[in-house]
Amino acid sequence: MFFTSTRSVQSVTSAAAITRGIAADGGLFVPCEFPQMTFEKLMALADMDYISRAKEVLKLYLTDYTDDELDYCVRGAYTNTFDNNDPAPLYAVNDNTQMLELWHGPTCAFKDMALQLLPFLLVKAANKTAPGRTIVILVATSGDTGKAALAGFADVPNTRIVVFFPENGVSDMQKLQMITQTGCNVSVCGIEGNFDDAQSGVKKIFTDDAIRSELDKKNMEFSSANSINFGRLVPQIVYYVSAACDLLKNGALKPGEKFNVAVPTGNFGDILAAYYAKQMGVPIDKLICASNRNKVLADFLATGVYDRNREFYTTSSPSMDILISSNLERMIFHAAGNDAGLTARLMKELAEKGRYELPKEVLAKLQSEFFGGYCDEKGTEETISELFKQYNYLADTHTAVGANVLDQYRKATGDNTLAVVASTASPYKFAASVLPALTGEAIPEDGFAQLEMLSRLSNTPIPAPLANLKGCEVLHKNCIEKENMAEFVLDFLK
Ligand SMILES: *Cc1c(COP(=O)(O)O)cnc(C)c1O
């Protein structure tokens, strides 16, 4: 299996794609074809545990890793790191809706699914393509990626990691998780700006030749732990395959039937993984793309015009407060029949004008696969309240956006097919926003008092990784202008 850039025809191994993170032309690495998984194979996986399922899926894409290497990587990532050693359980809220809970890992959000595995994949990849070099991971985060990447890479030999987050654009709990991070190879820094500023700043550093050669002299090399790295995507494909296996196994899905998938979306990585699973033969039908008030994707799927020139809102689902959705580039490339020329042209327009328009036939292809919708702040709160009152299910703000747009899809189309909603974060990570949906009582200021209150009202336990933050020392106090990100990185690497 070879990988190409979305912006020019290339042919690189998976190890090279994972080590580099982003192609030199600014494009993203994508597989040249989709490996296939037969129904018989799916049924065989249904009898295996998550680790074995993960290995079988990874094997299809990462063909330059040996069996032993993949075995080592998946065992390291998923053994004793997730509650009950069950990384992606399904929870049936009603007859035709199941929550795929992806937040039972060390940082309580779905980013752990990929970021527990990525360090293992990356270290193996670097051994193949850049032996002896130190890999410097740069991360821009809207809140959850940062902590998950830190948890995955802390004290991993031959790696350093720098995380940039929008100083005023993450939840208190998310911020506390990051600024208390220990590890001899980690650095965390707030920036004056939003996630898009952090992401653009990081991309600029990646493609700056002067900085690259500076690192080269130190025998160092940049890579990315953001979902622009293919090594982030492939572990996410696994849980959609795994969900299909579980549905077949428990009889909710019959042979020959398909299910829909609803995903609260920001950078388009999670839902793209569902699209990849579908291309491989997993019986997925409609992909429901749910945005919050920053509804650039919903507008795009309706009109074919991507326009980031609009007001940016800070919402109760901060991990989706994004106006430049990186992984959409991969989707456009595939929908256009792997057309790198077209993708490069559209991305250039996006960089220069903040806007582009899809050719009609590419839009038609996207609309045949995806339904786009959005949910505002009021809808988010109402959905959390409804899910709790009707089904005794406690959803976080992001998951609620997904459930709300699924509901809109069902009302608009009458399609009540079994649907899996990606449940992307523990409600405890966003307690301040979840609590008002459950109670009229006054909400305490203190974050830990909020956790206690949520536990009391919902009769569910506080996740240990969040409870344990209490009393942790704040180790990272930097906050810089976005223009100074490169300087900050070079300073850390001195
Ligand atoms: C990152 C994140 C999302 C959005 O996922 P994308 O892959 O960026 O679309 C949704 N919910 C939560 C809780 C997240 O952390």
Image (tube, rainbow, N blue to C red):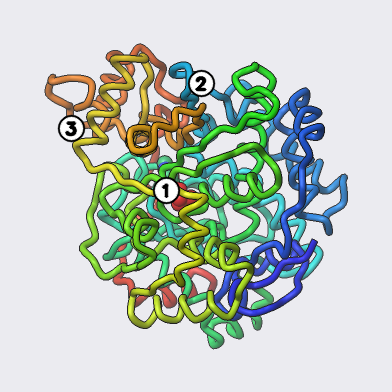
Residue positioned 52% across, 65% down in the render = 332
Reply above or below: 149 against 339: above
Q: Secondary structure at mark 3?
A: loop
Reply above or below: 63 against 289: below
* Mark 2 residue CB less than 8 A from any atom of ligand 1: no
> On the image, which quarter does residue 14 sit in?
bottom right
Tag 2 or tag 3, which sits nearer the N-term? 2
Alpha-carbon span between mark 1 and mark 3: 29 Å
Label 2 neighbour load within 10 Å: few <14, some 14-19, many 20+: some
Tag 2 or tag 1, which sits nearer the N-term? 2
Residue positioned 66% across, 40% down in the render = 238
Q: Is residue 144 visible?
A: no
Q: Which amino acid type is marked by label 1?
A: Thr
Residue positioned 44% across, 19% down in the render = 93
Q: Which amino acid type is marked by label 2?
A: Tyr
Mark 1 lies on residue: 265
